[in-house]
Image (cartoon, coloured by chain):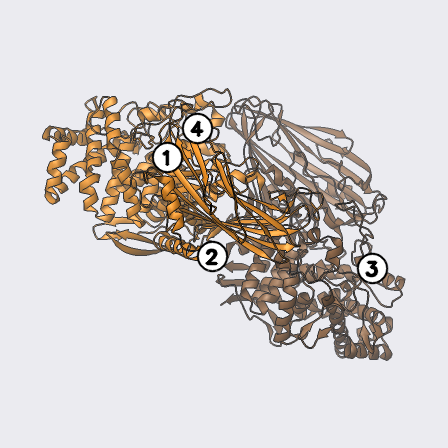
Chain colours: A brown, B orange
Amino acid sequence: MKNRLWSIKEYPFQPEKQLYHETIFTIGNGYLGSRASFEERHDGDTPGTFIHGIFNHSPEMSVPELVNAPDWTRINITIDDTPFQLITTSPNALHPPEGLVLGYERRLHMDIGLLRRTVLFRAATGNTVRIVFDRFASLADEHLMVQRIQIVAIDGTPKVSITSALDGNVTNLGIQHWGHMQADATEDGIISLSGQTNQSGYRLGMASKFTSPEALTTNVDDKFPSVTSVVQLEKDGEATFEKYTTIYTSRDTETPVEIAYAHLSALPDYTSIYEAHSTEWGKYWESADIQIKGDETAQLGVRFTTYHVLIASPRTDDDVNIGAKTLSGFGYKGHVFWDTELFMLPPLTLTNPQMACNLLMYRYKRLAGARQKAQAEGFEGAMYPWESTDTGLETTPKWSDPLPPDNKRIRIWTGDIEIHISSDIAYGVLQYWKWTSDDKFLTQFGAEMVLDTAVFWGSRVEERNNRYEITDVIGPDEYHEHVDNNVFTNKIVQWHLEQALDLLLWLEANANEDYQRLVQQLDISEERLEKWRDIIDRMYIPFDEEKQIHIQFDGFFDMEYIPVEKYSPRVGGIWGYLGHERALNSQVIKQADVVMLMALLGNDVGSREVMLNNWKTYYPRCDHGSSLSPAMHAWVAARLGLMDDATYLLDHAVAIDLEDNKGNVQDGIHGAASGGLWQAITFGVCGLQLTADGPAIDPNLPEHWESVTFNVMYRGEKRTFTATH
Amino acid sequence: MKNRLWSIKEYPFQPEKQLYHETIFTIGNGYLGSRASFEERHDGDTPGTFIHGIFNHSPEMSVPELVNAPDWTRINITIDDTPFQLITTSPNALHPPEGLVLGYERRLHMDIGLLRRTVLFRAATGNTVRIVFDRFASLADEHLMVQRIQIVAIDGTPKVSITSALDGNVTNLGIQHWGHMQADATEDGIISLSGQTNQSGYRLGMASKFTSPEALTTNVDDKFPSVTSVVQLEKDGEATFEKYTTIYTSRDTETPVEIAYAHLSALPDYTSIYEAHSTEWGKYWESADIQIKGDETAQLGVRFTTYHVLIASPRTDDDVNIGAKTLSGFGYKGHVFWDTELFMLPPLTLTNPQMACNLLMYRYKRLAGARQKAQAEGFEGAMYPWESTDTGLETTPKWSDPLPPDNKRIRIWTGDIEIHISSDIAYGVLQYWKWTSDDKFLTQFGAEMVLDTAVFWGSRVEERNNRYEITDVIGPDEYHEHVDNNVFTNKIVQWHLEQALDLLLWLEANANEDYQRLVQQLDISEERLEKWRDIIDRMYIPFDEEKQIHIQFDGFFDMEYIPVEKYSPRVGGIWGYLGHERALNSQVIKQADVVMLMALLGNDVGSREVMLNNWKTYYPRCDHGSSLSPAMHAWVAARLGLMDDATYLLDHAVAIDLEDNKGNVQDGIHGAASGGLWQAITFGVCGLQLTADGPAIDPNLPEHWESVTFNVMYRGEKRTFTATH
């Protein structure tokens, strides 16, 4: 374990930041993620274990959500009959009536994906123990969760009673997604819990084995099977307990709990499990670590975000995807957004392409849902939902929760009209193919997504005013709804159709059988192609010739101009200060929109002069009300050589989760911001791009950065780059 | 202003850390220090302005304390009649009934000694302003305190009412040290406050000028003279207000308030004042900055501690000294300890010798008090008090405040028997002389202190058991009281007498007139010298020949052994956990004692083998219950090449104030720890020492450190060193 620039810590216990720490200390392995609530629970905590793909649509909710699974981490300890809890003050430290925590440190070791909590606890008797809680979700064996508890007698000869449990008394912040649960225990002390979600019918099975130097007593309460062991410590004595929990769902096997039992019985010892796990982590960092010299905050920050992208990314499952808050919180209900393809996917595409492929396959397998959405809306082809879950159907809620100050619900329009996601997915597919040359994926799966979403666009664009327009949309800037001709959307659709035409030419020449199949299956007629070419030629790209800037959408500059910088220093989003009404009718934008386009399409957007004009226009109008925004801005600022801006924005991006500068880390990690930071550094600061000769860099480093070293996979080969001034 | 690695910030407002930030953001200029309480006040705040030398012995207290002066920072603002306060939540952000802070950032710019707070505030009317509060204590003109308030209309056309006041309603945490106060105002809006301490009779005068674009109205309330100005801002308009406060005491002039008025009338403009101030800061950093490559936390940390040593150090006054908590808090009542000579003095001696000289002169001027103490205790010569104030008399309280759990007062013995301070002062004098070759100081002042404290020791040591012993003392490790033959004390006395003999030889040869004067005045007879030589020869230095270690004091190893590491991770001092009784009778030590000796005397303590043995013995027994301890340990660990330990201890030392890892920063900056860090890096890590050829380094850097660059003054010349691996 390396501490320096590889770990983050909490010392001492900070009760007011409990939920923040639950999120940032989340562990996971791509199969599930578990928040860092305490084994023994604590007032106000929000334990959360989220297993990819396990959604449920409770009748109490308007949309499905990712289900909080039973809490596999539960361990209760008493020392001389004093329950171990995080009590930090007492009138009497020698014989604290309710026990007392004399010391506390918690550290997430990102190098090996291990969370360790060390606590010095004194019982009412005065006897004192040090308890070290380790936990990890095995990266080598994704159905296996491991805990180890070491208890050392510091003062006296304490009697330890330790109870290991599986806790099925869980909800999603009050919403019950589980139907009947069955708790069991075997004669040799293995406990289990199985259950089924109450709408979607997913079945879950967990089994847990506990090791103790002394005998175990089992107890099968409703939804709370447990084993207890009592150990009398000698002076300076210690005892080690291990807990192994295996987890399966009906997505993995027909018989989850049986397989969970079987898996437990075949486990190697702790050391072997730990070593296999840490070896896997070593491999991951070999591929994905970015080394920054000259900025330790950025170094730690990018390791933190890279850690969280990894633990959320399915490694073996190609039928699930990553929610906006990863597997680390209840925010956004586990729903999948464009956050995947344009933010979290690129670092995986470039460092761990197999994991990227899994995510793209999730989209492929949901083409039916996308086609259904297109059809329902009166269009052709495939129109991906703005928010997606297991079904692939549109799951964006229509209404918000009641909002202050007057508890009104606001209509959410993104599911209806934020339609650029179909091109974002095409972008992700094509970026994957260009970096990997995975022709098999392209011909079997990827091309169909790119082409059928192109088919959708052919039917969606509107021929008006002697050109093609796209009206009534929401662009990346979600502060403005029902806008016409959002330049991001129009331009990326134009680019998408160009790519689709190029792709067809490539397929015809290189995979003719697939070409024929797709042309037939998707009805890509010459007439349709003609229309695509016409759209490309005559797509309306709002542009002010006089000022040489793109116009974010029709009428954008007719609204009130509010330079956002004026409202600095701010703590919250600017909407709360301006009010809904005024904000809607102002030029304040939520996040990178024209700037996002410049990040994605680079020089295709316009000359350097136009790009600079766009920057000077849109940067001062941007609220960064979305965590997605700073990294994209940093990327573009670095490309334009505006290094003061780039440096400021990189700092902002780094601080989003670690400093909680949006104030909502308790809801989960900002997954897109995490992937965005990786891109801001590689694509932005280092100027990484694919040239005719393969990947190359063109660095613009912040003044105080000395160098950046990173790896990318290009066509199956690892390339290492070091960027310097 | 440089932000990166030159500033520390609070963002957003952290009410639970209010007192912590008041301390760490303290500004000062060596004349006074002012805590960073808000201009408008806030619930639970503790404003504090401490002027060097102004002590008072209230009848409510057992000892005198440094007096909290009237609050010169006071400024009240209303926006559209809504009082500006740090209110951070409101049910309605558009028309918050009590006003609302929408944004907040505070940053201490250590490069130029300026504190800036920027706040976005909305009045109940919905009108919004940004207020920027700047404050600094001029380093170029130490009687001048400067504030500037800029208010910008962000929304609407707010009406600003601003009141600048001097607030004499101050106490020291409830203790009233001021007698009658007189508030006044002139016709042109200059306000003033004068007062006198109620026991010591120090008189204070403050006068304050306020500038506004609009007219001023004066108001002379009891102890609260103020001027008010009302400014109607236009849309996007702004107004700037300046406040200049001059402060004098009867220590500076017979007529403090008159001089304060006169000084105000002769001030140049803001820009000139600001530039003179920042130029002085530039000079300071030129001399005192340590540049660390490879560890940004340490870099920021040592700048922070260097900043605080500077602002507390009298620049022009040689009759005052620095309290243990500097001028930044109420802790230790402003009393002066050995913290000066062995911790804060060395960085000044080596970088700003004139300031070091001032501190030594304070001791010189208090020889009478030291002689009085010696006499009262039945000894000869000069015996410096453990705690010192303006009088130079012993001011250590005899009893503690009531302590938990049972509100008992504990007898404090340090004033009676922690007597090594007399040698600590001699050490400071001789170190100053060796680095500066300031023979004039030595012959006129320094030698008298070294020699008369030597005279004290000649009378204090006890001839027992065929050797010289020193019984019934407290060493640096204050967990053990009434011990016999503390090795730190015995050894440093031996060293002190050796130095005194050497000094006499030097004086005889180089300053014979002074030599004759001193020999006569201090009665340094041949008989006395013979006794000193005998003491040097036969001083008992407790040592275990078998284990080849020094013994901290007689019987130390007979007590209970408690390896302190066993109690990790701890938050508080170990005494609280062990209880008074058990701790007293254990080998747990509060702070570097034998290790401190190794830091100060280096190879004179013993062979490398003995030094390593001592380290292995005492480091595991040390609680670091004093903030003085980690830096001294880091120093010694680095010298011994134990770089893992050194790195851990440096991190610990860096975190004392910035991470508040002792939990008491609210009481003031840990001045000794601050000066100690400077020494741990220069003397410890870099191995700086005076050789026959002048200063030289012999670095042992922590593995991840790339280099350390620093300057020292040697005999009036600046020498720059860069230490690398």
* Alpha carbon separation for disc pair 4 and 3: 68 Å
Disc 4 residue type (three-letter): Ile
Q: Is residue A660 left or right of residue A319?
A: left
SS at mark 4?
Answer: loop
Q: Which residue is mark 4?
A: B562
Answer whether residue A717 is visible to the viewer in this image: no
- Label 1 packing within 10 angstroms: few (<14), some (14-19), many (20+): many
Viewer-nearest of discs 4 and 3 = 3
Q: Which residue is mark 2?
A: B2
Mark 2 and mark 3 on one chain = no
Mark 4 and mark 1 on one chain = yes
Q: Quadrant of residue A595?
A: bottom right
User: Tags 4 and 2 in contact by the CB under 8 Å rule?
Assistant: no
* Alpha carbon separation for disc pair 4 and 1: 52 Å
Q: Which residue is mark 1?
A: B203
* Alpha carbon separation for disc pair 2 and 1: 39 Å
User: Tags 4 and 1 in contact by the CB under 8 Å rule?
Assistant: no
Q: Earlier in the sequence, mark 4 or mark 2?
A: 2
Q: Quadrant of residue A504?
A: bottom right
SS at mark 3?
Answer: helix
Toward the viewer: B431 or A59? B431
Q: Which residue is mark 3?
A: A416
Answer whether residue A601 is visible to the viewer in this image: yes
Q: Earlier in the sequence, mark 2 or mark 1?
A: 2
The x, y position of residue A179, in whole percent, is: 83, 39
* Alpha carbon separation for disc pair 1 and 3: 75 Å
* Alpha carbon separation for disc pair 4 and 2: 47 Å
Disc 2 residue type (three-letter): Lys
Mark 2 and mark 1 on one chain = yes
